[in-house]
Amino acid sequence: MADAPDPLLVVGRTSFLARHTLAALGERRARAVSHDQLDDPRLLDGVGCAVSFAKHPGIHQDGYDLERDDPDVRLARRIGERPVRFLMLSSRKVYAPAERPLHETMPLGPSDAYGRNKLAVEQRLRALLGERLVVLRLANIFGFEVEPGRRTFAALLLRTLREKGQIRFDMSPFVERDFLPAERAGAIIAGLTQPLGRALPSPLNIGSGVGLACGLLGLWVIEGYGRGELVIERPDERDAFVLDVRRLEALTGPVIERDGLREACRELGRRLGTQPGAMPSTGR
């Protein structure tokens, strides 16, 4: 007897967060594909839920052609009228600058090209899919990001600590942001990937709900690494944010506590210390 069709489609299978989500799914069946397989005629056979981790590099720039280039829009058009739930990974950058924490009902007004393009994709997908769309607005998802060329906050932090024994900030270390470990984010997304039938709120913030000073995060990583220094190049205070995660916690329970964030950061430092090219210990 043939196996039952896969109920879950994961697009962008090699992305950092996709890998953590697939790991969290465990034994659950999922069809994981790359973005260049979006035109496969059998892509959606038997699928009840789809989540896309694919991202076109042009989304960070003004003039982005979402109808031509955006993988989420292409996938939504493929879904058409099918009874498929679509989880879209959006960004906290769609919100207008406001007092913290940022709630899903607050005004929208992105301040950069990435936020404007993400909001445009949200609106296009909502027009295509209606209530089948669940928009997930992500905080700063971080983890052991040591792939060459990766330029996220955590990737740059880990790279300079390993290569130079320093974490360098061009902003105030007291700026508070919402950070969520990738392992926890992947587990949350995995738990939300259900076919139509179970009601899910949309949009839905995905974050820790904890305002964590960026400098403290860096010091916790150094603590795990066992050596290094934090260097502040500029005192600018910018881009502070915390997400309101009460909607999320109503579904999942508590997301993560401050102590959990500290341990996640220390573990990054410990793992970094085992990598080739790590700075030798000073013995202090």
Image (cartoon, rainbow, N blue to C red):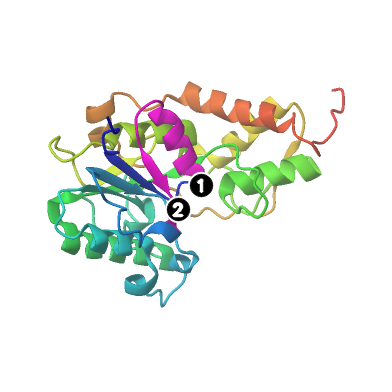
Quadrant position of residue 32: top left
Q: Residue at x 15, y 49 (%)?
A: 83
Quadrant of the rendering where the N terminus is positioned: top left
How far apart marks 2 and 1 lie (CA) works out to: 7 Å
- Residue 14 — which label? 1
* Horizontal side of residue 189 vs 167, given as left or right: left
Mark 2, residue position = 34
Q: Which residue type does callout 2 highlight?
A: Ser
Mark 2 residue element: loop
Q: In the displayed image of the protein, which residue is found farthest to the bottom?
A: 63
Q: Is residue 167 visible?
A: no
Q: Position of residue 219 (x, y in %)?
A: 64, 33
Give the magenta range. Answer: 16-35
- Residue placed most toward the observer, 23 or 209: 23
- Residue 83 — which label? none
Q: Is residue 63 visible?
A: yes
- Cβ–Cβ below 8 Å for labels 2 and 1? yes
